[in-house]
Image: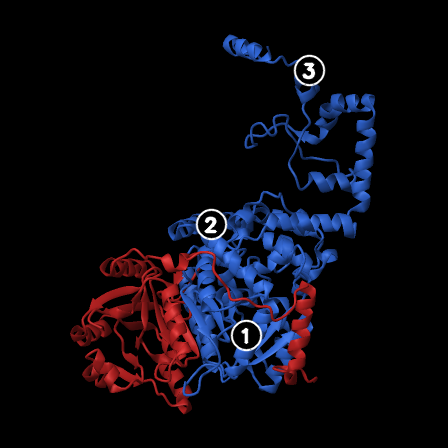
Amino acid sequence: MGISTSDKPFLERVADAKQDHFMQAAVAKAQDAQFIKRTRARREMGHWNDWRDLAEQIRQHTLKYLPDYLEMFANNVEKRGGHVFFAQTETEARDFIRELVLAKQAHKVVKSKSMVTNEIELDQTLTALPDVEVLESDLAEFILQEDNWDEPTHIVFPTLHKNRDQIQAEFKKLGYQGDNEPAHMARFVRGYLRNYFMQADFGITGCNFAIADQGMINLDTNEGNADITMAMPKTQVVVMGMERIVPSMKEAEVLDNMLARSAVGQKLTTYCTFAGPKVAGEVDGPDDFWVVILDNGRSRALGTEFEPILQCIRCGACLNVCPIYRHIGGKGYGSIYPGPVGKVLSPILGGYDQFEELPYACSLCAACTETCPVKIPLHELIRKHRIVEMDEKHLDHSMTNLILKMVGVGTGSPALFGTAMKMAHSGAAPFSKPMGKNDVQGMYEGGKINHLPKAAPKLVHGWADLRDIPTPPKSKDNFRHWYQNHHPIEPAPAVKAKEEKADD
Amino acid sequence: MTDLLAQANTKANREKFLNHLAQQAGRDRHQVQPFEPLNDLPDQVLANQAPQALLATAKQNSEAVAAKVYLKTSDELASFLDEYLQTIQAKTLLLPGVCEAQWEAYHLADWAGHPQGVTTTVWSPEPADRAQNAQAADQADLAVGFADYLIANTGTITVVTTPAQGRAFNYLPEHYLALVPQSGLVRSTRQAVEKYEAALADGFQTSAINFISGPSNSGDIEMELVVGVHGPVDCAYVIVTDR
């Protein structure tokens, strides 16, 4: 499966999402609440666009010299007594960590939130081992795990699609007896996980930023679970996408500030930690420190027009402004990376064949580009995917040809075109609904097309089911008719006199 | 089982990967230039605030992240801590295993020797005592630790892992209280990072530098903010005004 979260075709996923009214309300509420928090936090920071320029520069500089910074980081981790493994593919990364768990004879693995470990399906791999338990310690990831490893639907709020009653039901299976108050449920998880933490012998974390010149990793959390994951077990594995690196703590610090403001509207996450292997004399922390640096298709973006997607710091702000995400939620995308960032990243990591629809699940409104703290031109990259699909992959070949042929025939003959303009309104009438109470004035004056017969060609359904298409106006109301009968307003006498004078 | 583990830290594993990146990018390796930031915004954060205003800002921002802030002189500390233990009804206390001189710098040598009315454990700097320290941290109602800096802009204290004050010390106890000298008041995360970078360059050794802003929290259930998830449920900064 890799980054894919669903075997269903895209349209089926969208249809499912349309039925899920709780999810839609939750996403809308989250987007609106985050808008207020994010905007406030950014305004408070001041000179937001100059900060964005700086953040973009940091990310672009690092990507430009990526092999050099990775080399510097690896050398420094080694100097600190750690080990670095470069994994080209998800299989290599997964097998490596599995071998390490076996070699360390670990039985209780504890994880903190990491998208990359979802990407390499680490949980499934490790839980399949005999005598190995795995527990996610981030509250949201823990909830997903208890719900039979449900997939995350947001990169910052993975359980956005679940309500408190569903969560309560999952916790009851673990012996929780309280009500559905989030505070009470969180308290229960604290106790449950603390017992596990005390016995954990193998910790797995992600990495927000690797610090090249120190050989340390930088992690941002609000719960403190990553720090406990780095404190208790004697072995720690850090799994990081190869692009998650910066030259020094100074650049990490800039990005930490921007990440927290963009992701959750905080100035800084509650815990922001720079850590490496245990230093001689210290009592806790990992004796054994391993870093797995993963490519898994990221290098396909290097040196191409898609390289800027590697600037991403995973704040999720683009999801929080996306009108498509608002409607179809995370599951609609079928990738662990949903939203605008997912539309760009998923086809690169998972291939066009698997994610060909995603670049089209976009209105090109550019809200994502506008909000991105590291200035990734997201909507332009989405458009570039479409260009690649049309020009090189020819994924849409037959449909586009057919449409254009019909348009050619229709517009090539004045008689056909005239008839079409006359008949469009009455022809569409049986499939249309007159304007409803909540319709946007103007756009749907003549009503909208929304009840096509089942027998209509799939192509037509494909268009009409996912979009609000206005009914064509009556022939007497259409633009051509209006233009024919339109008389320009006479200019005011003074203006006229001036114009005549100028003509002379 | 293959030999994947043996490939870690090998030149072959690293070179193959990095050469592939250079080739994909179409850029040669080993061309790295120092990073020259295009603006100095990080240095400008709160740059115009005088020390007293900065302290007020620090207090305000710390309270905004739900940290409790107290200003005390070192002479007031012992009685303040006794009171604090009573207020939160602590029965178990965890203290860092620092030398007496460090306590005395805060006029706390007597207090740390025999805190009243609580079962006290001192973090053992012996690596062999790892499990025992972890148990003590897990059971502790309150940990009283030393912090280096207080960051005004974000309401953050910074703590490093040392033999005397380990990682679990800062994360497992139910309540956490940090003693931070007022001389450690800095404007921004940038300033704190610069100080740590200088210390590390000078040979200071630590495996973890922690920036902590208030108590542990989460908004993972319906985005409702809940305080106290894995780390301390409550966090106090005591700014020692004469240090």
Residue A73 circle label? 1
* Quarter occupied by the N terminus of chain A: bottom right
Quadrant hosting residue A435: top right
Give the residue pinned by disc 3: A484
Secondary structure type for disc 2: helix
Depicted A473 relative to depicted A333: above or below: above
Front in this rendered view, residue A75 or A396: A75
Within 10 Å of the Cα at label 3, are there few (<14), some (14-19), or many (20+) other Cα atoms? few
Q: Specify whether residue A88 is in view.
A: no
Q: Position of residue A138 (x, y in %)?
A: 49, 67
Give the residue pinned by disc 2: A49
Q: Specify whether residue B84 is in view.
A: yes
Within 10 Å of the Cα at label 2, are there few (<14), some (14-19), or many (20+) other Cα atoms? few
Letter of the chain in red: B
Instruction: Give the letter of the chain under mark 3.
Output: A
Q: Is residue A263 left or right of residue A390?
A: left
* Alpha carbon distance from label 2 to label 3: 48 Å
Secondary structure type for disc 1: helix
* Alpha carbon distance from label 1 to label 2: 30 Å
- Residue type at mark 2: give it: Asn
Q: Are marks 1 and 2 on the same chain?
A: yes
